[in-house]
């Protein structure tokens, strides 16, 4: 049974490009996995530079009796609309779910 609809060759190529790129470039699930790749290391350096440039945090001594909230790297491969690779993007995020409401919402201490 043939469909009365014809798929655009342009759309078909776009889908194929994305499928091929997804097979070639994988997103790490851990820092240990990402640190072995020069592309992901570069993305992490760029993120740290942006955090520093934007004065995202201030280094201070940890106050006594305060719990430190951990951080985690998130990795994403970004693609252009044609399916080609745009860039590797790394984000350093605080594990805010570890905070207790009303206790450590005003100030967050992370390693």
Image (spheres, grey):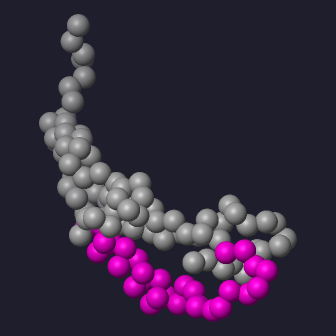
Q: Is residue 49 magenta?
A: yes
Q: Which residues are magenta?
A: 39-68
Work out whether 80 lies above or below 64. above
Whole-percent x and y of residue 90? 39, 67
The residue that appears at 61% across and 65% down in the rendered structure is: 95
Left/right placement of residue 108 relative to residue 32 reads right
| Residue 62 seen in the current view | yes
Q: Is residue 51 magenta?
A: yes
Single out the residue that lies furthest toward the top. Answer: 1
Q: Tell me the quarter of the image containing the N terminus.
A: top left
Work out whether 78 lies above or below 48. above
The residue that appears at 34% across and 54% down in the rendered structure is: 27
Whole-percent x and y of residue 20? 19, 43
Single out the residue that lies furthest toward the right. Answer: 102
The residue nearer to you, when weighing 68 against 55, is 68
| Residue 81 seen in the current view | no
Work out whether 66 lies above or below 15. below
The residue that appears at 41% across and 54% down in the rendered structure is: 29
The residue that appears at 41% across and 64% down in the rendered structure is: 31
Left/right placement of residue 46 relative to residue 25 reads right
Q: Quadrant of residue 9?
A: top left
Whole-percent x and y of residue 41? 31, 72
Whole-percent x and y of residue 105? 76, 74
Left/right placement of residue 65 relative to residue 32 reads right
Q: Quadrant of residue 39?
A: bottom left
How many numbered marks are there? 0
Q: Tell me the quarter of the image containing the C terminus.
A: bottom right
């Amino acid at each position: 049974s043939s469909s009365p609809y014809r798929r655009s060759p342009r759309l078909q190529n776009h889908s194929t490009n994305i499928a091929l790129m997804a097979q070639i470039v994988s997103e790490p699930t851990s820092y240990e996995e990402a640190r072995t790749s020069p592309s992901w290391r570069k993305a992490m350096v760029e993120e740290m530079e942006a955090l520093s440039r934007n004065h995202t945090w201030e280094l201070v001594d940890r106050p006594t009796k305060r719990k430190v909230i951990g951080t985690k790297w998130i990795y994403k491969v970004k693609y252009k609309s044609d399916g080609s690779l745009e860039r590797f993007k790394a984000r350093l995020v605080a594990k805010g779910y570890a905070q207790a409401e009303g206790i450590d919402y005003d100030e967050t201490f992370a390693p």
